[in-house]
Image (cartoon, coloured by chain):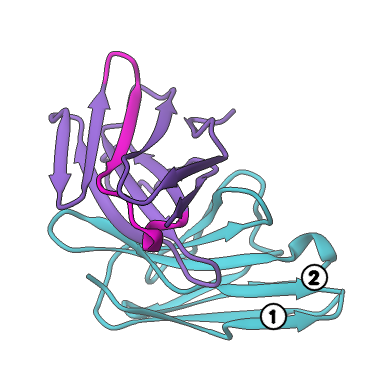
Amino acid sequence: SAVISQKPSRDICQRGTSLTIQCQVDSQVTMMFWYRQQPGQSLTLIATANQGSEATYESGFVIDKFPISRPNLTFSTLTVSNMSPEDSSIYLCSVVSGALETQYFGPGTRLLVL
Amino acid sequence: DQQVKQNSPSLSVQEGRISILNCDYTNSMFDYFLWYKKYPAEGPTFLISISSIKDKNEDGRFTVFLNKSAKHLSLHIVPSQPGDSAVYFCAAKANQAGTALIFGKGTTLSVSS
């Protein structure tokens, strides 16, 4: 399985500011995803981070609000821009790894926007 | 439109008994199903999976059953232990390149000693 780390693990931010979340994987992976889990809700896919090209966003998520970088096969960042309290959530990085192409998750970043 | 549904938000079981967590899906293109376990302040941990070519997969105390005609799967934990107390997420995907998982809302399992 892949070992995934995220930074920061948590943060409290003021509305209108931006936060960049980093995701580091211990091996090269092709597929990398960013999810959000709002309080009491399921995990919702924000986008697929593609290496060498622009991220692919799901319905309801746009690049201006959630810009993503994927400079190489072990690292990605997600920025939450111009934050509002509705962005308070857990943000999770996820990768596909192994022969069975199982999806693994990082520990998450807990974001609180005041 | 929720494609993966976990209709029971919570389940309470006594230690040593069986825990059965249920999941329904609507998309007939789904052909790979997974269960994840999540503790507070941690990311989801992969537990067990099943391909649509099987109807059962077992790993230690955990067994997943798949009923394709009913579009239903279940996770059985026997015997349940207090350390199993967590949120369990059912997830599904259509096994195509670049397809990410679709998750249910989760079921909170509480195992009492």
**Badge 1 sits on which subunit?**
A
Left or right: where does residue A91 sit relative to residue B46? right
Q: Output the letter for the chain in cyan.
A: A
Q: Residue at x 71, y 64 (%)?
A: A65
* Chain containing the residue with disc 2: A
Q: Residues within 10 Å of mark 2 (few under 14, many from 20)?
A: many
Q: Identify the residue under disc 2.
A: A83
Q: Position of residue B108 (x, y in %)?
A: 52, 48
On the image, the x and y values in percent for residue B105 come to 55, 43
- Label 2 or label 1, whichever comes before in sequence order: 1
Task: Name the image quarter holding the N terminus of chain A.
Answer: bottom left
Residue B84 lies in the magenta-colored region:
yes
Q: Is residue A66 above or below residue B47?
A: below
Q: Amino acid at mark 2?
A: Met
* Lateral position of residue A28 relative to residue A41, left or right: left
Q: Residue furthest top?
A: B69
B111 vs B106, nearest the viewer: B111
The residue at 55%/72% (across/down) is B41
Q: Is residue B77 magenta?
A: yes
In this picture, which residue range is highlighted in magenta?
B68-86
Residue, disc 1: A19
Compared with B83, B96 (above or below) is above
